[in-house]
Amino acid sequence: MAAAQDSGWHIILINLAKLLFFIGLAHLPLTLFAYFSGWEVFLSFVATNAMLLLFGLAFLFKEPGGITHKHAMTISALVWLLIPLASSIPFALYGLPLTDAYFEAMSGWTTTGFSFIADPAALPAALILYRSYIQWIGGLGVVVFALLIFKSRFTPALFRTEGTESFQHTVAQTVKNAWVAYAAFTLAGAVLLVMAGIAPFAALNLAMSAIATGGFIPTASIAAIPLAAKLTLAAIMLVGATSLALLHDSLRLRLHRLLANNEFQLLTACAALGTVLVAANGVLLVDALFHAVSALTGTGFATADVLSWGAPAVLLLMLLMLIGGSSGSTSGALRIWRVMVLAKSVYSAVKGVFLPRFAVVKTKAGAKTLTDQEIIEVSNYFFIYLLFAALAAFGLMLSGLDFASAAFTALSAQGNVGIAPVIGWYELSDGPKLLLAFSMWIGRLQVFPALILAAYLLSNRRLSA
């Protein structure tokens, strides 16, 4: 038994090290940029890179053997804990308390956007760009980690947690297409923001954050940005919440695939309906559009105190945060695919009541006929997702937040949205901060890898079985 367990952890350690080595390589461009932000900042990036690369090199050329479903899920859960830990070094050495540094890094990698840095503009330029950069890499993280590293038959298992399980191309081609689309739309977004009146450096940071549906901003506030810039950011956020495969098709002028996609249709419909309903509560149309899109896509940009808009508007934004974006995108929360499955399954159940006893009712989501197992998996996920959000909200209430603020913040953290309450945010103690970091981690993993890791650690069962 001990040997089997050692073998399981050996497989996990080797693949985890390779992932961390990849992240170390991804840090190199920022390390070079940090050289121009001062010696102390540069050394903090060197320390981060050294930790990641040296640990990765120790196992880089070792062959771990076959990766099972349990291995893949456990590695995924661990890597999203360890990467923010390493990435917190530059923030900690700059002067942030250790909890805040880890929180900032976790918020960045999970593309949440929560922050306890009141004025990011006061940071060195390297740290400002670093915050946006880790969100940008983190937004594409699952695609990179699953397809670039886990080249095994269990790769689809990681993608099923995002509501999709099909591959149109080979592993290498899928990664290439994702990167091409991601980089192209990021660059286009930055150019459009410059044309809308945003300074180039700020435009680059905002474009990286928006396409990753992240939410970090390079200044204390974006409330005063021009109207054209707000509308441009809204468009970039919607792009970020769209499947990367569809974005690549759009680059090749295959727009009919995008327009015919059920998830994209529902995404735009939810954004439009959410805008109208929020605006109906006395909110300016532009603000309603901006925050409805920000909540739905999980970006978390905010230009106003949304909790002051009244209960109906806040409830609508919470519902949008729960829905999330398309599967295969950088967005979080439930994902539109799961919402479609839940809605269709409820419709089929109601329809079945009025049919003969032995009638067969097929449940379809788009062109796909759903199996009973798929419906059960989505229903289970929905229940577990809400359970974790409720527990987080309860914990926040114990820390002193009122019910509305606690529920809103819990959903915002677990959905990797990042819209925070204005009142009491900077007074939160380390306990609630770590709770929110846990919620961000759970949400970015789409819950199940975290549960598998916990089950293994608690039961001490062999992973290689």
Image: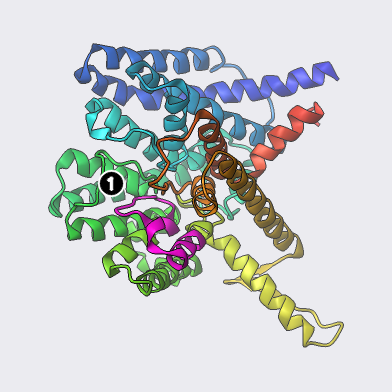
Q: Quadrant of residue 243?
A: bottom left
- Quarter of the image that includes the N terminus: top right
Q: Is residue 300 magenta?
A: yes
Q: Is residue 420 above or below residue 373?
A: above
Front one among 170 and 120: 120
Front one among 116 and 218: 116
Q: Which residues are magenta?
A: 295-320
Q: Is residue 464 above or below residue 246?
A: above
Instruction: Identify the amino acid type marked 1.
Output: Ala
Q: Is residue 181 above or below residue 29?
A: below
- Callout 1: few (<14), some (14-19), or many (20+) C-alpha neighbours within 10 Å? many
Name the residue at 27% across, 35% down: 119
Name the residue at 38% across, 53% down: 240
Q: Secondary structure at mark 1?
A: helix
Answer with left or right where residue 301 lies relative to residue 370. Answer: left
Q: Is residue 346 magenta?
A: no
Answer with left or right where residue 46 lies relative to residue 400. Answer: left
Name the residue at 28% across, 17% down: 41
- Quarter of the image that includes the C terminus: top right
* Residue 126 percent across, percent down from the top left: 26, 26
Name the residue at 33% across, 49% down: 210
Q: Main secondary structure of the magenta part?
A: helix
Which residue is tagged 1?
207
Q: Quadrant of residue 375?
A: bottom right
